[in-house]
Image: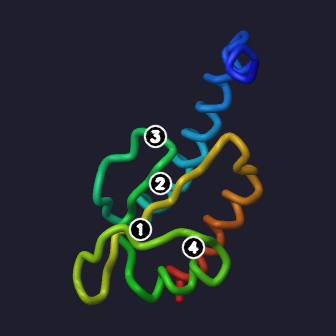
Amino acid sequence: MQFRELFRDTLYFDLALHANRTASRIAEAFKKHGVPFLAATETNQIFPILSERVIEQLLSKYEFYRWKRIDENHSAVRFVTSWATPERVVDEFIQLFLSIRAD
């Protein structure tokens, strides 16, 4: 029953499009400020390489984890957005990132 509803009309694609767009907005904010990535962003998962300082400050408000240690001061982290990720949360996340980068 769930799958029949999920695939009715374009619901599945609409939900996936939202997840991918929110991840893309975050990835673009990182790219705009010179953040490198472990892998290209093509889905709702992004893998930016951030300094430990930035990671710790973002972890104070958001849940995510270190995907791979790059060196003693940097790690690739994994962010995942979903069909339920509100645009306002993406805006708040980007604003926090920008304020940390400005420090």
Q: Earlier in the sequence, mark 3 or mark 2?
A: 2
- In the rendered structure, which amino acid carries the disc numbered 2? Ala
- In the rendered structure, which amino acid carries the disc numbered 1? Val
Neighbor class of circle 1 (other Cα within 10 Å; few <14, some 14-19, many 20+) is some
> Circle 1 — which element?
strand
In the rendered structure, find residue 77 and report the number of the disc placed on it: 1
**Residue 87 placement, left or right of 49:** right
Is 15 located above or below residue 91 in the figure? above
Q: Earlier in the sequence, mark 2 or mark 1?
A: 2
> Circle 2 — which element?
helix
Callout in the foreground (2, 1): 1
Callout in the foreground (1, 4): 1
Q: Residue at x 60, y 79 (%)?
A: 99
Neighbor class of circle 2 (other Cα within 10 Å; few <14, some 14-19, many 20+) is many
Q: Earlier in the sequence, mark 1 or mark 4?
A: 1
- In the rendered structure, which amino acid carries the disc numbered 3? Thr
Neighbor class of circle 4 (other Cα within 10 Å; few <14, some 14-19, many 20+) is some
Q: Earlier in the sequence, mark 1 or mark 3?
A: 3
Distance of mark 1 from mark 3, alpha carbons?
15 Å
Q: Earlier in the sequence, mark 4 or mark 2?
A: 2
> Circle 4 — which element?
helix
Callout in the foreground (3, 2): 3
Instruction: Give whichever of 97, 64 is nearer the camera.
Output: 64
> Which residue position is annotated with label 3?
43
Residue 52, picture quadrant: bottom left
Distance of mark 1 from mark 4, alpha carbons?
17 Å
Q: Residue at x 46, y 40 (%)?
A: 43
* Cβ atoms at labels 4 and 2 below 8 Å apart: no
> Which residue position is annotated with label 4?
98
> Which residue position is annotated with label 2?
27
